[in-house]
Image (cartoon, coloured by chain):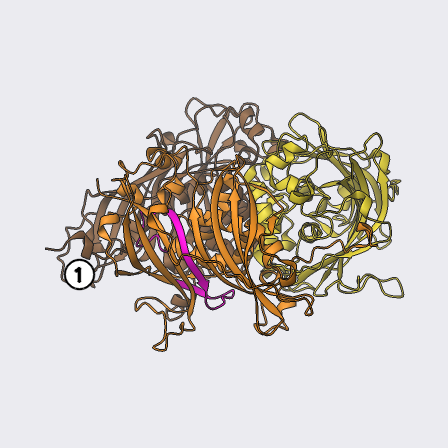
Chain colours: A brown, B yellow, C orange
């Protein structure tokens, strides 16, 4: 019989053979967010959405003050899952069915709980795919956001039997009538001058493509700080020496850093799209490294009215980020349907936008 | 007739031919400043002026708490003007007539409005100089600071007729009797031990030169974070890939980063000069790049009493910053009157300082 | 007679021959800490100790809110001493007898006073060792922490007579019964799930060694920001150009950055060791540079009960940090007793940990 004393004191995290369907994983490291976190996030990405930069503007839109950027909230909730879910992952395969249900405000404290909803061992017997639904809660136990991700994780005991395959049924798109408008939000007096653009929900058409023009070169310290803001401890992002013998030979940039950078750059084109409503799906299709320059473009995939609201509408966007390639001609996939090597991110999501009233 | 739908959704900003005399430009992205912004600014520059680092010290000087560093306030107010005024600028030519009228405190929300006060098309017909007076307001519509800058901007339509030339009449020096002491400030019990130096207003003489001794090497991520703190989106500072084909072949450091670095280094020599009162003029005379080491020196250009105040005086300073050249011998201009290639900044300004009471 | 006017306005700091036994040095730059400082510290180190990341968790442990990380508090108190004590130091030789007496909370204002308690001129007549006890106070004049450090400082006037040698009597270990539990702290309902590990005080055995597994590559901007957070202005950390002619040829990383990094990495192994209680001794045995990757391991040196407390115990730890060498085999000293060249830090300290109740 082994006592707790003789156990390794360091956490190795879960392997594929540690998971079972229905397993609930409450994650460590609860986190109170502050205006300090907001300020660092802004310094890393250059926030310009007026509702997130000005408490006065937020109050004029019916909120108590500026909420935290939704993507930052997503990363913090995501980060807590890393030590338990993906520290032994070979690849982060995708996101789906993510809804932003409640804005976070400075002073709120976040917890995350994950539930295993799918398992599929790979035919090589060495790895398997784990699907988890992760839910972020605030200090009042209200759900802040909720999403599914799936990762390919190493097995520890190669002789462990394969679990029954369960692949969850995931929506390819979050239904627009299930999107949740932040409590109190009222865009009827939205100020487009301070917002930074005259373009409102009515002005975008399905199929329209927008080059977000600007480029941002990734500094090593910036992506590492970004990763630490969310307490994501995946060593691949921090340990350049340890990465030398690997196929990339260096640290990899946290995929969330590319999402945040693309979201910030998309201000030029969607200046009034100040809230994320949902993430329908997202893939990091090529890795990024320090020194890469991020560009991005977007396409309007769909438009939806919001039930009982004349002041607010939803746009479904695809935002594609590239590295070291400007996006005037919307780089995406080859004729064979493969992502171009310069493409790093393919993100499909809903945003809320003021309507012309 | 074109509808709003067919317009490009990205902002291209104004060109020389978009401006007209008297034009008022309310800028987007209102901004609530927080102790988070203050902390990042301090982490980037190493604030040591006691009044800005300690709420207790500030209260002992009659203020409600530590105000934000004046230069940081200047950059935030400046940053808002970039998308509208200088995103298509070839060069930022100068600043003048800047007065610091009200300190900013965490919780304040800033807006900026600019007015076009001068225009002069260049003889090449491709560019012109635009003079704007930009005014920063707090949430109570009080003027926080006010300054003029002029930039050389590209024309978009080369066939557009040249506007009538108007060159504003700008003071070479802000009159010392127009300087505004922050409301409530009382230096009669100023603590020089905590302030960091025994030297007060009386101890400086016109013509005296001070080498600020220390050097600071610019990290890429630091100048980019600094630029984003002020929501300045000029792509020349962020897009290293896009800059490769240009004459510099790389990102340029935001000039404000050099001003802030020099101001922080000047603590060693002016430890008690905790408030900027005015900027008489400023020029970025050579560009800086990541990896450059900033040094600086100052000269006392003038001294002025403050009307009806025995506790506070003003010093007019010239601070000159260099790159990769220490300042023990005060590098400045050649015999021919040209700035030395190592000189990056020539800043002429007023500071407030406690007097010996 | 020289007047204050003719004195150099820049501070040169103290040399060995400026110090005398019993001298009290009140340091400049009082500092109000904020959630902004906490957020930057977290972004630099990736805080994961639940008590410091969640106000709710802290309240569940009897505190008013999350206190600042103890090591960050140490650095801020330390930083104030640099301009007066070690700006002319050749080497920072060691720390001892450091007790953490009161947690710092956002809003607190810190002052530091040092007292010279030892002097010993070196036989070369050019340098000497200065021992100071530095004490950090909050705005209520309560002692926050207290420690001794000794540094080798240059003499300015080589003809100045050697002072009488005084070497203070310093404890090699802070007596465990003198450790001070933070006021109000109650671990009787400590939540190990949110804390991140099942291991409590009872589970560690003297002699046990723990490899903290992860590695962190040091970015230049990160160590500089870290150094500036604590207003440490030692130019060796900032001026890469000025360091070129020296034996290292480049900036050196502030030793405190290695301590903070090691402390953050030690979460994996000591997830519930959320308070520092004392530093018994510490040495920076080899310098670190930007680009180095930090790894670390720890050994349990001792265990102590805390008088009258069943909910809390103390562990005495040695944490050894390395550069570019993973710590699975606990690298430390050669057979001859010399530190291995990869070892950068040898830190001996007490932490508080919840007990199984």
Instruction: Point out the residue furthest to the left here.
Output: A1
Q: Residue furthest front?
A: C164
Give the answer, above or below, for where A81 lies relative to C217.
above
* B339, C80: nearer the viewer: C80
Lateral position of residue B166 relative to residue A213, left or right: right
Magenta segment includes C123:
no
Query: Residue furthest toward the bottom?
Result: C336
Q: Is residue B119 left or right of residue A214?
A: right
Q: Is residue B214 left or right of residue B21?
A: left
In percent of the image, x 48 and y 48: which residue is there?
C146
Residue A316 on image: x %, y %: 44, 39
Q: Secondary structure at mark 1?
A: loop
> In the rendered image, which quarter is residue B32 located in?
top right
Q: Nearer the viewer, residue C291 or A289?
A: C291
Depth check, front residue: B33 or A205: B33
> Is residue C89 at all visible to an observer of this figure?
yes
The percent position of residue A353, horizontal first and vertical second, equals 50, 32
**Chain for disc number 1:** A
Q: Quadrant of the C terminus of chain A?
A: top right
Residue annotated with mark 1: A157
Q: Position of residue B323 (x, y in %)?
A: 71, 62
In the image, which residues are magenta? C266-295
Residue A354 spot, x, y in % from top left: 52, 30
Residue C281 part of the magenta-drawn span: yes
């Amino acid at each position: 019989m082994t006592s707790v004393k003789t156990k390794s004191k360091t956490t190795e995290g879960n392997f594929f053979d540690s998971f079972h369907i229905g397993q609930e994983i409450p994650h460590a490291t609860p986190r109170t967010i502050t205006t300090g976190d907001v300020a660092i996030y802004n310094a890393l990405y250059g926030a310009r959405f007026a509702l997130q930069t000005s408490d006065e503007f937020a109050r004029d839109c019916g909120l108590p003050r500026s909420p935290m950027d939704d993507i930052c909230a997503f990363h913090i909730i995501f980060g807590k899952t890393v030590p338990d879910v993906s520290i032994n992952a070979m690849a982060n395969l995708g996101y789906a069915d993510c809804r932003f249900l409640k804005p976070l405000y400075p002073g709120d404290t976040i917890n995350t709980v994950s539930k295993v909803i799918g398992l599929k061992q790979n035919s090589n017997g060495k790895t398997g795919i784990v699907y988890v639904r992760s839910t972020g809660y605030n200090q009042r136990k209200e759900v802040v956001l909720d999403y599914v991700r799936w990762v390919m994780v190493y097995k520890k005991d190669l002789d462990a039997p394969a679990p029954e395959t369960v692949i969850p049924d995931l929506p390819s798109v979050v239904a627009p009538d299930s999107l949740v408008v932040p409590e109190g939000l009222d865009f009827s007096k939205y100020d487009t001058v301070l917002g930074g653009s005259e373009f409102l929900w009515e002005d975008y058409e399905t199929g329209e493509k927008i080059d977000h023009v600007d480029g941002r070169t990734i500094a090593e310290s910036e992506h590492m700080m970004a990763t630490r803001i969310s307490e994501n401890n995946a060593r691949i992002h921090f340990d350049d020496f340890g990465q030398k013998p690997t196929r990339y030979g260096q640290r990899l940039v946290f995929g969330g850093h590319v999402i945040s950078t693309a979201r910030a750059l998309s201000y030029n084109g969607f200046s009034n799209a100040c809230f994320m409503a949902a993430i329908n799906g997202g893939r990091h299709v090529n890795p990024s490294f320090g020194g890469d320059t991020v560009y991005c473009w977007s396409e309007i995939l769909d438009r939806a009215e919001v039930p009982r609201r004349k002041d607010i509408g939803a746009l479904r966007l695809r935002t594609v980020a590239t590295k070291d390639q400007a996006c005037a001609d919307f780089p995406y996939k080859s004729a064979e349907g493969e992502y171009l090597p310069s493409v790093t991110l393919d993100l499909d999501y809903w945003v809320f936008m003021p309507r012309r009233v």
